[in-house]
Amino acid sequence: MIRGVGEPDPVNRRAQLACAWSGVVFLVMFAIGMVALAQFIPPPKANDSLGQTVSLYADHTNRVRAGLVLMMSAAGFTAPWYGVMAVHIKRIEGRISPLTYTWIACGGAMILVILSPVMTMIVASFRPGRDPQITQALNDLAWIPFIMVYPPVLIQQLTITGAILGNARQTVFPRWVAYLNFWFAVLLVPAVAIPFFKHGPFAWHGIFEFWLAAVDFFGWFAVMTVFLMKAIREHQIDLPASAQ
């Protein structure tokens, strides 16, 4: 049976929804790995002693490793999510779509932003009996970028803001989602202070760094997943007249 103009393509819609649901898979897997297995909530402190840092990886080593592997595996599920979000940003922009390609580039970078620090934590846990100073260096090399490398997601948030506000007639996302994304981007800026503090709210474990970044990124990811699924379900794919 041939579909008429304006009828949804069920196969395409299922594929898009599967990609959107991959974002939920990422959130769940990452949370289980980080919270339940690795038990990195609350995070280690920037001013931890050598002994405390070594204990982070030497105590319950296999459980920590399992959590880190799950966190690493979860990162892959962000790729389909970034891909289907790009489809709907392009719907807003049309044929000439620089913001869509900006989003895609930042999506690839974000996967590395997640993978690289987690892999460094895995290296730290691989030989927990090594020189404590090396373990501490690896721990710093993991946690500072893990919390501080915000530019890709900030640009993605501004990309959505620009796409929505740049097209007053678009109906893919509500207009207020643009302002929400803008404020999500603004709340990432305090991360620039991480290199200057080992104590207090601006240290990497502080309220203005780890906790604000976690609420910002994962809250943004969850909110945009909801609106992405709504956009997919409401999207009508028109066939060319020759296909009727």
Image (cartoon, helix red, strand yellow):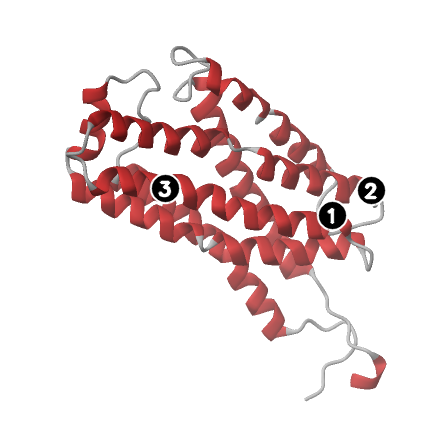
In the displayed structure, 244 sits above or below 107; it is below
Please say whether residue 244 is visible from this viewpoint.
Answer: no
Q: Amino acid at mark 3?
A: Val
Q: Secondary structure at mark 3?
A: helix
Residue depicted at 19% across the width and 40% down the height: 127
- Callout in the foreground (1, 3): 3
Q: Position of residue 71 (x, y in %)?
A: 35, 46
Residue beneath label 3, please? 118
- Front residue of this view, candidates 201 and 15: 201
Please say whether residue 84 is visible from this viewpoint.
Answer: yes
Q: Residues within 10 Å of mark 3 (few under 14, many from 20)?
A: many
- Callout in the foreground (2, 1): 1
Residue depicted at 43% across the width and 28% down the height: 144
Q: Amino acid at mark 1?
A: Leu
Residue 131, image quadrant? top left
Q: Secondary structure at mark 2?
A: loop
Q: Amino acid at mark 2?
A: Gly
